[in-house]
Image (cartoon, helix red, strand yellow):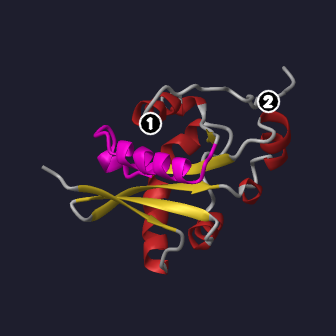
Amino acid sequence: MSTIETKIRRFVDPVTAWFTWKVYDRAFQKINLQSPCRQSFHRWDFLKVMFDRDFVKVFLYVDGKPVGFAVYTLSLEKLPWVSAEYYRQTAFPGLKVAYVPIIAVSPKYWGRQYSKPLMEALDGLYTRDGVDRLCFDYADENAFLPEAIAAALPGTIVKETLGQQHYVSLHREG
């Protein structure tokens, strides 16, 4: 039986940052070809997150080998595609909001329920920080994600869709 553990860090060393970039980039290669909106950070932005203490990193290890990670932050203004004002003033005024911009497990380990320990660790952060709403985004190609996250969290979880983005192409016939 495999040994599964999670470790929570605010800062990572350059070797760990580079390794996690490779896992992350591989995990999102396919979906970035399926969606008109990039579903992952570019390398430079990813590495900035890895070295920023406002982003809490949760690493997943199986038999001592790093196989996945998640990132959690209360600093919504540091996510370029997120409107912190919307979350704080329109959607959830007066509530504490956290955002999970990254959940990634190496494709080699998909389908083995290894994201569950990541979700449990995020739930611990959510509870510790007194967060009222844990938010994230996903493309239609990852529509399983809300249910998978909800299944890994204790209690009754309520999903609220906050909006949708439309990508449109116009062209002339003929």
Residue 129 sits inside the magenta stretch: yes
Three-letter residue code for mark 1: Leu
- Which callout, 1 or 2, points to the residue nearer the camera? 1
Q: Quadrant of residue 64?
A: bottom left
- Residue located beneath label 1 in the image: 153
Give the quarter of the figure containing the C terminus. top right
Q: Is 18 left, or right, of 78 in this rendering? A: left
Q: Could you tell me what secondary structure mostly forms the magenta stretch?
A: helix
Q: Is 138 left, or right, of 169 in this rendering? A: left
| Residue found at x 64% / y 66% | 54
The one nearer the camera, 78 or 93, is 93
| Residue found at x 49% / y 25% | 156
Q: Which residues are magenta?
A: 104-131
Q: Residue 101, position in %: x, y?
A: 60, 50
Three-letter residue code for mark 2: Ser
The one nearer the camera, 110 or 96, is 96
Residue extending farthest to the top is 173
Q: Quadrant of residue 49?
A: bottom right
| Residue found at x 84% / y 36% | 90
Q: Residue 172, position in %: x, y?
A: 87, 24
Q: Residue 167, position in %: x, y?
A: 76, 31
Q: Residue 1, position in %: x, y?
A: 12, 49
Residue extending farthest to the bottom is 14
Q: Tag 1, which secondary structure?
A: loop
- Residue located beneath label 2 in the image: 169
Residues packed near mark 1 inside 10 Å, few (<14), some (14 to 19) or many (20 plus):
some
The one nearer the camera, 34 or 61, is 61
The one nearer the camera, 64 or 98, is 98
| Residue found at x 52% / y 31% | 146
Residue 123 sits inside the magenta stretch: yes
